[in-house]
Image: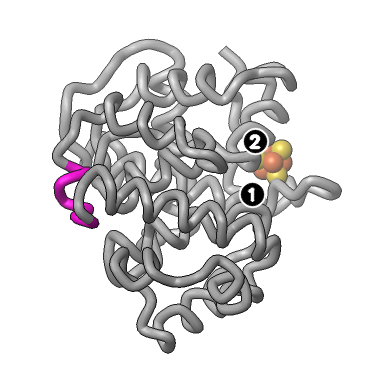
Amino acid sequence: MSVTGKYGGPLPKGPWAERLHEIFDRLLAAFGPQHWWPGETPFEVCVGAILTQNTNWANVSRAIKNLKEAGLLNPEALFSIPRHVLAEIIRPAGYYNVKSERILTFVAFLMQEFSGDLDAAFSLGLWDLRSRLLSLKGIGPETADSILLYAGGYPIFVVDAYTARILERHGLVGDDVSYDSIQSLFMDNLPSDPALFNEFHALLVALGKGHCRKGRPRCETCPLAGIHLNP
Ligand code: SF4
């Protein structure tokens, strides 16, 4: 299985495209499909994308479990809950005061603009909905793009700290590169395919967690070891 074998769309050419394809193929061969995003419904994915800010997924899972048990994983139920009550329910995710406010801001947007209908929101064009999400307090590019890709199925690449670190350590980008520049690098050099973007981001997260750690990278056992990436 490779980027050229499984995923559709016209394949951009050039050195960047070749490097990204090689990275993807190596990661997929090493780690296999990651089956992201771990959420039962698109709305759960949206809430998870906010909860996962600045914490690990184990903590998010506990908060999601609490929300499910309280019957709150739908826009209507969350819209009527006081913020301090929601904060207690999502406490395991950390930063629960800030995150409860952000979730309620997102839910209010959904209720007021789309009568709580996520499908109606996802009927908008990619860049239109993205700019509306980015206008919400506490929704930055990574969260907005996670919602758009993993809940909405839009063809947009999610960038995170792991992605930037991996590219920077291989000399592909500078340490001051912007989110948008990294995103363009992937989107301009890969087929515009949500399934590919889904898998690629998840594989980069797996690489960042398992090998390309902040302090001591495990290059000796890394699937990208020895690969010549610098154009
Ligand atoms: S762990 Fe080493 S080889 Fe692997 S991506 Fe990071 S810097 Fe590259």
Amino acid at the residue labelled 2: Ile
* Element carrying mark 2: helix
The label on residue 133 is: none
Q: Which residue is mark 2?
A: 166
Q: Quadrant of ligand 1?
A: top right
Query: Residue 150 at x, y = what percent?
Result: 33, 51
Mark 1 close to ligand 1, CB under 8 Å: yes
Give me the C-alpha separation between circle 1 and circle 2.
7 Å
Mark 2 close to ligand 1, CB under 8 Å: yes
Is residue 118 found inside the magenta-colored segment of the image? Answer: yes
- Nearer to the camera, 53 or 184: 53
Q: Earlier in the sequence, mark 1 or mark 2?
A: 2
Magenta highlight range: 116-122
Q: Is residue 98 left or right of residue 13?
A: right
Q: Which residue is mark 1?
A: 208
Instruction: Name the residue located 75 percent from the left edge and 49 percent from the top edge.
Output: 213
| Label 2 environment density (alpha carbons within 10 Å; few <14, some 14–19, many ≥20) | many
Answer whether residue 59 is visible to the viewer in this image: no
Query: Residue 76 at x, y = what percent?
Result: 29, 67
* Residue 27 position (above or below residue 42): above
* Element carrying mark 1: helix
Amino acid at the residue labelled 1: Gly
